[in-house]
Image: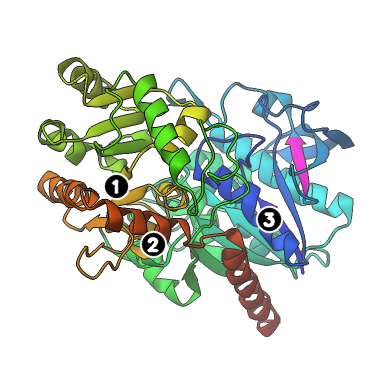
Amino acid sequence: MKILFVSSEVAPFAKSGGLADVSGALPKAIKDLGHDIRVIMPKYKMVDEKKFSLEKIFDKIDIQFGITSEEVSIYESKIPGSDVIIYFVENENMFGRDGLYQENGIDYPDNAERFILFSKAVIKFLVKLGWQPNIMHCNDWQSALLVAYIKILYKDNNFLKNISTVYSVHNLVYLGLFDSTKLPLTGLGWDRFSPDGLEFFGRLAFSKAGIVYGDVINTVSETYSKEIQTPEYGCGLEGLMKYRSSDLFGILNGIDYDVWNPGKDPYIARNYSENSLVGKTENKKKLQAENNLPVKKDIPLIGIISRLDKQKGFDILSEAMEKIMHMELQFVILGTGDTVYHDLFKKMKETYPDHIGVNLGFEAALAQLIYAGCDMFLMPSKYEPCGLGQLISFKYGTVPIVRKTGGLADTVQNYDPQKQTGNGFVFEEYSSGALIDAVKRAVMAYKDKKKWEALMKKDMNLDFSWESSAKKYLSLYKKAIEKVSSSR
């Protein structure tokens, strides 16, 4: 099978969130299963040509863009640690910037133009390359237009018309909304600007191009695929999602155990495994010391690595913090986001210096140390399409405390200390009271060291590798191919 995987960000080249992790790992797993998968993304300013050995393969391809045109060049490299070919679309005017989609928290005003250009360039490049994929796998709104292009603009093109399309929704909240005046730049006609096309309450929604016209649609967990068919999580598209439900699937993301593995993680104080947990204690000591917390082996240490906003549950966490700080525990946070929560945690550190470590920003090495050094990992999300934090924390023997939603519901089962079933601590009601109760249950369970160690080891042996997810994606690709074949 030949697959073109299209993403606006791919780790380790450029990353703003989980999409980059998926885009950097899933293609490698599919390649390992014997398929010709290639990746394409924009060449941002942050993509290091020398470090990643980029080679220019096409220069100055002319792309029609409204009444003018833009030129793009194409570079080629490989995803590190693999034979997966990755292409980069270069246009200095559109992508030679410090950010991916925004700077200082403000979206670039020409994001529509940027990703229209990217999508048009992908089509032009494919034809020029002469490589004809069976599947074009597009991800989130930045590449959704490609689905519409294949199905509408190129439905009679001999080279492109037989390509099957898969569209992945990583987070439905990001619809890719723009003023309707941008529509002519896409090359699509005004007949597509309707509720059953690309229109969304008077605006142009790029994401709808993937959802309306994709042969197959998927989200990043089974529960989230059901949640987005409800008013609570559907972002105004629940009706469309229900309409497409027979073509809508949920496949849980995996994690790359070559990267997330306490047995060989180069960023932690001491490596360890389920067979020898001594190193975890050393990581805990280092994490406590770095956060100016009393170095105590037996006090439970809870970690959180997150964007600080309501989606991630920080409204209910802020209500719960005073009571949590009065429990016999320590708390370490790493993240950045809403200034309201920045101020809250600064105040908590001033008031409870022996109970909380606050790191407002992001540092990869510290993130690894939090996974390795904490006893528990907190994710009180209001919604969570998949979530990677709980999967990583499992591998590091750091027991998750989560709200039952999306991928968290699919991966974390509530622990019963009597039966010793389950793998974490789950609360369902979205409230500070339910969150506090879950933390109390975790702290209580932690006191039984023998059972807690058994729980840690069980979690560390769980398998959420990409191989299993990759096989499910291949099944999805076959469904898309069969759908196109049957419609001929």
Which of the marked residues, 2 or 1, is nearer the chain's N terminus? 1
Classify 55 as above or below 169: above
Q: Determine the residue located farthest toward the bottom in the rendered image.
A: 486
Q: Which of labels 2 and 3 is toward the front?
A: 2
Q: Determine the residue located farthest toward the top in the rendered image.
A: 350
Residue highlighted by disc 1: 381
- Please state if 114 lies on the left or on the right of 70 as rendered: left
Image quarter hosting the N terminus: bottom right
Instruction: Please name the residue shown 15% across and 47% down the image.
Output: 440
Residue highlighted by disc 3: 27
Residue highlighted by disc 2: 411
Instruction: Please name the residue shown 19% across and 67% down the image.
Output: 418
Instruction: Please name the residue shown 66% across and 51% down the image.
Output: 6
Classify mark 1: helix, strand or loop: loop
Q: Are marks 2 and 3 in contact (CB under 8 Å)?
A: no
Which of the 4 image quarters holds residue 325?
A: top left
Query: Residue 76 at x, y = what percent?
Result: 83, 40
Report the amino acid beneath label 2: Thr
Tell me where the magenta segment starts and ends, as one range. Answer: 85-89
Q: Tell whether position 69 is magenta.
A: no
Classify 255 as above or below 73: below
Report the amino acid beneath label 1: Ser
